[in-house]
Image: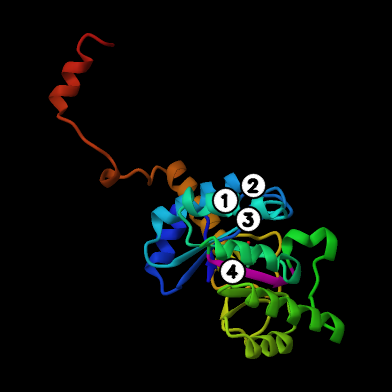
Amino acid sequence: MVTTYDFTGARIVDRSEVPLILVGDSLGMVVQGHDSTLPITVDHMIYHTRMVVRGAARPLIVTDLPFGSYTIETDAIRNATRVMAEGGSQSVKLEGGVQVAPTIRRLVDAGIPVMGHIGFTPQSVHAIGLRTQGRDADQARRVLDDALAVQAAGAWAVVLELVPAPLASAITERLEIPTIGIGAGPGCSGQVQVWHDLLGLYGEFVPRHAHRLRALADESVAALDEYAADVRSGAFPAAEHSRTMDAAELARALEGIG
Ligand code: KIV
């Protein structure tokens, strides 16, 4: 799974072999420039999901329910329904384990497929801090209980974020639904990466678990510098970039003008 936030990105994923798109609320950081995912609204998620849906026919599309949009169960139903009906998404994802399990159950009963998200949950960053979850036995047991609760509530998959690799493997072995890891080691059923991390588009902060396979920000800067140099030197635009017209027509247009 990879995050994607717009039409062009979705077209690219559509051409790849990646089976799942997450329209993640990480767009608050990598697209909107906030320092957390908290300012994202349901309207933002619908807006971006629509763009992604227009560009991707093959991958399954999952959309994050943003911070505060599912705290109250009736809000969860209304907002998830909007994300599916107005956005065109095929599943929602929400953060939390035992505490949100009743909400997951309500959504699933309403016909809305739900992906869970446990371990480090970015929407709770101010409550739990940006740290690995489940390093000691008590914490690890809580993460396992969260995983089991999310599964029992009817989620079809669960993201494990910043969970020690041995714990993520132990959870994956005990669940029937797939686990999708980010900073959770190789023992998960699948992996998710943020688009900008994978392609090297977001330079300010590179998380340790980022699989940076390209440096597209650096390549883009080089391309822009080349463009500016070509314009300054006159190498661009060349004849092949230009449109022509009949010289007699131009002469006629300029008749009488100094
Ligand atoms: O919003 C997001 O990008 C996510 C991933 C980190 C799983 O939730």
Identify the residue position indicated by label 4 in the image.
115
Q: Single out the mark in the foreground, 1 or 4.
A: 4
Would you name the residue on which mark 2 appears? Answer: 41
Q: Residue at x 69, y 68 (%)?
A: 101
Q: Is residue 209 left or right of residue 154?
A: right
Q: Amino acid at mark 2?
A: Thr
Instruction: State the residue at coordinates (66%, 69%).
Output: 117
x and y percentages locating residue 220 in the rendered image: 52, 56
- Residue, disc 1: 45
Where's residue 64, x and y in %?
A: 60, 59
| Pointers 1 and 2 in contact (C-beta within 8 Å) | yes
Rendered view: 152 above or below 194:
below
Q: Which residues are magenta?
A: 113-120
Q: Secondary structure at mark 3?
A: helix
Alpha carbons under labels 4 and 2: distance apart: 19 Å
Report whether the residue tagged 4 is closer than 8 Å to ligand 1: no
Quadrant that contains the C terminus? top left
